[in-house]
Image: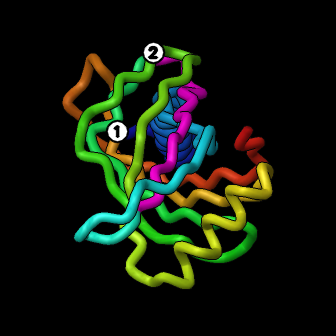
Amino acid sequence: MRMPQCLRSALALLWLASLWCAGCSTPRASVGVSLVNVALTEATVQGTAAVFKVRLQNESVYPLVVERATYRFFLDGGLVGEGSVREPVGLRESSPAECTVTVRLADPALVERVRTLIARGRVNYKIESRLGSGQLDTEDLVTLKTTGTGTVDLH
């Protein structure tokens, strides 16, 4: 005995709807990024570096590990540079953690611009980041793209 066409269509739609709902229930990793501080190192043979202290905020109810990260830093609208972190950072559920990112500044004019901005005491920032992250209880590693903007008081 064959199943009527309308019943087969209804079952197919029900099956597709259940797949869609299962996909919606998959937990998504979400991490916010903000600037805590920026400082310049003393000039060395390798040049001067800007040291950015970054706060990562786990916006998920699941613990995450950021395995690797790449950041692009903008201060008052101008690109300062890029830096990366290879040490894992653990983020408990709905909690923050901080990391330090060093950016080499080869251009003396850029060093002077950053020095002036730091001396002002308040700076507008934008951070574009790519975070390689996974949940603590899984082997899945996903790349999260996130942007943080704001103003930071440096004193």
Task: Say whether disc 1 or disc 2 marks the residue closer to the N-terminus.
Answer: 2
Q: Residue at x 51, y 41 (%)?
A: 53
- Distance (Cα) linking label 1 and label 2: 13 Å
Give the residue type at disc 2. Arg
Give the residue type at disc 1. Ser
Q: Is residue 120 visible?
A: yes
Q: Which residue is mark 2?
A: 92
- The correct choice, above or below, for 89 with respect to 5 in the image is above
Determine which quarter of the picture holds residue 71: bottom left
The disc at residue 133 is 1
Q: Is residue 4 visible?
A: no
- x, y percentage for residue 54? 53, 41
Determine which quarter of the picture holds residue 87: top left
46 relative position to 144: left or right: left
Q: In the rendered structure, which segment of residues is drawn in magenta?
A: 49-62
- x, y percentage for residue 65? 33, 28
- x, y percentage for residue 116? 70, 67
